[in-house]
Amino acid sequence: MSSRALTDNDLASSADVRQLQEAVAHYQRVLSGAGYGFWEWDLEKQHIHWLGDFWVQLGYGEEDAPRLQDPNYMPEYIHPDDREPVLEAVRQHLRTREPLNVAYRIRKADGEYVWNQLRADSRPNAQGRVRYISGVNFDITELKKTEDALRESEARQKRIIQASNDGIWEWYAEQGGFHFSARCWEHIGYTEADDVLNEGVDRLQVWRSRIHPDDLPRFDQVLAAHMKTEEPFDIEYRIYGKDNSVYWIRARGRATLSQDGRALRMSGTNMDITHLKHAEEKVVKAKEQAEKANRAKSEFLSSMSHELRTPLNAILGYAQLFGYDGNLSLNQQENLKEIRSAGEHLLQLINDVLDLARIESGKLTISLEPVLVSRVVEECMTLMQTEADKYGIRLCVSLNDLGEAYVMADNVRLKQALMNLVSNGIKYNRIGGRVEVVVTQPDTARVCISVVDDGFGIPKDYQSKVFEPFNRLKAEFSKVEGSGVGLVITKQLVEIMLGSLDFTSIEGQGSNFTIDLPSVDGSHQDLMSESRSGRQDKSSIGELVVRESSRVLYVEDNRSNIRLMEQFFSRYPQLQLDIAEEAFLGIYKARSTLPDMIILDINLPGMDGFEALSVLKQDPATAGIPVVGLSANAMPHDVQRGRDSGFEDYLTKPLDINQMIGVLNRLLPPDA
Ligand code: ADP
């Protein structure tokens, strides 16, 4: 470049200069778009030259430029609280020449303040004097907000941790080693000043060495496993304190993994749960004890009841046998009746207690299957008729077109529940009263069986105690016999069958006890009849191959079943049918007549078919006689249970003639 002075023309024509101008324009565009304020403060002229749209962003216009360029006005734009710190920072900079870096609040045109970061530096001239300070201003309000929120959240966490009494810990992969907060050590009785923590030993090792040996492997394993995942972990373990007593710690934490799955850090909290654990242990122990006591009670009741039942069955049995003695005087017959009725009452009581004990000890098993409601109701009504007649009560049924409705229930247990309710309706009633069983279907999912009586009703004050065991609600002072457990059993039975039992009652007007059970589709009927019939051809009657004259004893209490069997046997002159309407009579007849075969109804009053079978099998005289069970319980598992109990065969009601013939063919001696 030559030394002559350049004229404007020279400059304008120079391509370099054009390039330079373009570059300046470019930077001006960039600078003004960023929202930054670039400035130079001329200390000599007391003038600030601004670049960029910093002030525009704060709402200022052209008219404000003179004041903004005058450093004397600058403090006015700074928040009063920040003015002195800013000036001091500038003075400091001039003294030390350290770059200026200060955050303060700056006033916008609308009077609000925003946070601003100022960064500046200056270069002294050869004489060491500073003429220009140049720097940049930018809005850091958002940053500040985040920072404040962060600080607040940190402070909050600290407060919470302090308040929660939790210790915190962190493990760092890079530095290696654990940080335990002082609270962690305090939990187990140490302070930071304790020697063991200051001997330069790895604190994690100290901690581990105190962990209960039974829990240490689990502690190590859980920790190691969680180093590989970001799943939170949560463990409880025992640790020995400084005084060697056992503390319980609940540790929760989470690992932070690097992109390639390595654990970078793991942080968490320790909670002292010693008190909680002790309380929990006490509760568990108390519960165990209560359960044990309850089990013992139930077992005692159960075994007592069994023990009582056996001799009672004998008393009742022999009382019945006496009844068949035609030589008794009228007076003796009356006395015998008393023995029987008292014995039966006692048996009922024992059975109730046994049932309750079984339910409470969880030993009662039920099998849910589709049960035809109308059949159960009908059977129950038949069974209760004698009782109703005794009390002069009229029994009636309203099926409301639900003759084909099925519920999911245990057939025997549902009948038991229903009989309990009907029996109460009869007992707690006046002569000429009425008990009605009403079947309704409130929605497709349920069927309700209500037992409605117009008897004494239950006083309001007593209604909350209706389901208390052994509480007879003052009925114990009346002539009505009872034990006060019938309703408890009924309720529990219904609940085991996934139903509910509720009642309403008005003193002097009557009561309504309603069993609510899940309904099932009637199509299950096919399933039942299938299991019942054994899929035989029903269109023609099979051939009986028995030619030799044989005697069959049929033990059954139901008249219509007896008639049916009599009709069937009347077709075969070689067969002789003998009937016993009670189990005891059946046993007596079996012993005295030694029939070729016995058909035993399962649901006999007093003693059921299974019990009668076991008596027959224990007696050498009758042990060899084939016994066939006959029952309305028709599900496959009933049949299985029957066969498993020692019945030669197990027939189900309604009786399938062909099946019956098949059984006779098999069990009776054929041709002589
Ligand atoms: P109990 O063996 O005494 O009949 P329950 O458990 O069946 O025992 O009934 C408990 C008590 O509830 C009865 O003693 C009786 O006071 C009252 N109770 C039950 N059912 C009825 C009813 N249908 N009408 C009036 N009172 C009833």
Image (cartoon, rainbow, N blue to C red):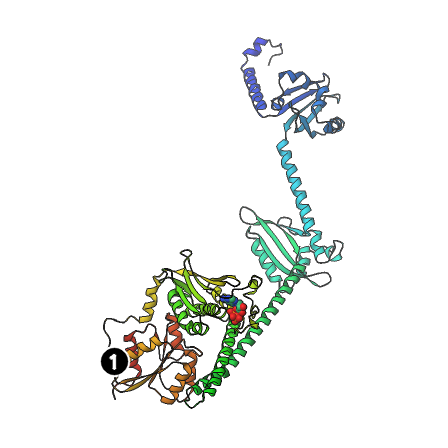
- Residue at point 71% right, 52% down? 182
Tell me residue 99's x, y (percent): 70, 29
Tell me residue 549's x, y (percent): 27, 87
- 161 horizontally vs 476: left or right: right
Whether the residue under disc 1 has CB within 8 Å of ligand 1: no
Please state the total of marks drawn on the protein image. Answer: 1
Query: Which residue extends farthest bottom?
Result: 327
Tell me residue 267's x, y (percent): 62, 50
- Residue at point 72% right, 16% down? 45
Give the quarter of the image for residue 656: bottom left
Label 1 belongs to which residue? 571
Amino acid type at circle 1 is Arg
Q: Is residue 111 above or below residue 294?
A: above
Quadrant holding the N terminus: top right
Foreground pick, 590 / 671:
590
Foreground pick, 435 / 526:
435
